[in-house]
Image (spheres, rainbow, N blue to C red):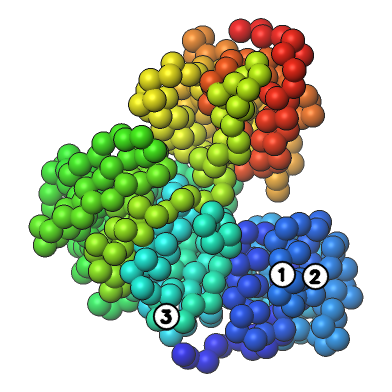
Amino acid sequence: MMQPAVDLSRVHLIGIGGAGMSGVAHILLDRGAVVTGSDVKDSRPVRALRSQGAKVAVGHAPENLELSGQLPTVVVTSFAAIPKDNPELVRAHEENIPVIRRSDLLGELMEGYTQVLLAGTHGKTSTTSMTVVALQAAGMDPSFAIGGQLNRAGTNAHHGGGEVFVAEADESDASLLRYKPDVAVITNIEPDHLDYFGTREAYFEVFDAFADRVTDGGHLVVCLDDDNAAACGKRAAARGISVLGYGTAEAAARHADLQPGAVIVEETLVDGGVAVTIELSDSSRVSYQLAIPGRHMVLNSAAALLAGVFVGGEPAQVAQGLSDFTGVRRRFELKGEITDGAFNGTRVYDDYAHHPTEVAAVLTAAREKVAAEGSGARVVVCFQPHLYSRTQEFAAEFAEALSLADACVLLDIFGAREAPVEGVSSRLIADKIAESTTVLLEPDFSAAPATVASVTKPGDLVFTMGAGSVTLLGDEILTTLTQPAGTHVDEN
């Protein structure tokens, strides 16, 4: 492997417990680096890193840079999430210690590997995870860094013994331009993160720039069912980049000027998932059964199949890996099922969906699942909008997506890095949701489980959904639904 341009012998990560940071920290530890870090709270990822040898402080302070007994050789931060006046950042600058982004560190860790980078507005984590599991089934041992935890492996990163490195390429702050992919996948392109990019045009342009990062002899893989991704592929092909598409037969026909690499020729709902048959560019076919429902997941699996074959995976083995894929935490994740009492048969799921297209995809998959089961169950969603800017920009689109549910409990906006904006609240969404959907605004987070129970019936599919703290409610909703009959009042 090539020597990194940055000294990675002692690395300090600010916000080490985050999904992205904790992953690269695990890889550094596996490679023998001294790893220190800090986060605002203790957590399962932090405890896992400590057990592996990292020294992690709760809270941010200048002295945290000396947790190992020496100053670090480099400090890693997220420019979007960590303010410039963070005391550890301030001291790093005072000590003239190099400060880099997490994407810069990941780029260094991938040097010398065959790099598979998966990008897109939606589906990055699921598609990256599918690719990893598929390559493992093909007998390869890829290194990987994912923005979520694989259900089967229980981890979000791994330092493998193979020559392939699979990673998620985040576009939210243009950090995906740090990488040099041998295989680059674009799942879809839809305006987002306009608080950073400013305009839709600037957001689209970052994917064109990402396509230009593909190495000589490498491949760009685009989803043909997403017209924006396909258009990006066509522009890249015109610039001389090798481009292959994946998607349904209808989409392949619509974009006949792009060479199809993986075409979905059969997609059938079956008990426990979706049976899929893919035709590859050499006209051979492979079949597998995907455990996670939804057209978006089928498309993601086709991308993973194509990426896996490109880096040497035998198609039938890669397809078997997709059959073995059990999902990613917070992606249509089953939290539990009620097996008796007033809410017998009700299932509670948790999902990270926080953009209207993602919300619509998950709720559509839920409705398809209900239809396939023939149970007549309803779909209930407890949704927490993420960011004031996103809520303001897409209120109508969120309302349209949430109208796919039979009942919707709307929590207050999770502002994350943003300050409140006057006049922007969850009511912007609630007022536009279809009359056929029962809507309740719930400003009291602690009261949400009881509010969800009030609109839930036996056998329903209940979702907690969003990128913020709503994920904490799944277990509480399960507990509320198992209380004795008569505890709740059904307002529907």
> Is residue 54 visible to us here?
yes
From the viewer's perspective, is the residue at label 1 or at label 2 nearer?
1
Which residue is identified by label 3?
162
Identify the residue at image location x=65%, y=79%.
Answer: 29
Q: Which mark, residue 49?
A: 1
Against 81, residue 353 (above or below) is: above
Against 25, residue 287 (above or below) is: above
Residue 391: x and y, percent? 59, 33
> Is residue 181 visible to us here?
no
The crowding category of the residue bearing disc 1, from other C-alpha atoms within 10 Å (few below 14, some 14 to 19, many at least 20), is many
Taking the image as shown, residue 179 lies to the left or right of residue 45, namely: left
Q: Which mark, residue 56?
A: 2
Mark 1 or mark 3, which has the lower sequence index?
1
Classify residue 100 by image quadrant: bottom right
The three-letter code of the residue at mark 1 reads: Leu
Q: Callout 2: helix, strand or loop?
A: strand
Against 345, residue 307 (above or below) is: below
Identify the residue at image location x=60%, y=36%.
Answer: 336
Residue 475: x and y, percent? 70, 36
User: Which sits in the foreground, 370 or 280?
Assistant: 370
Label 1–label 2 contact, CB within 8 A = yes
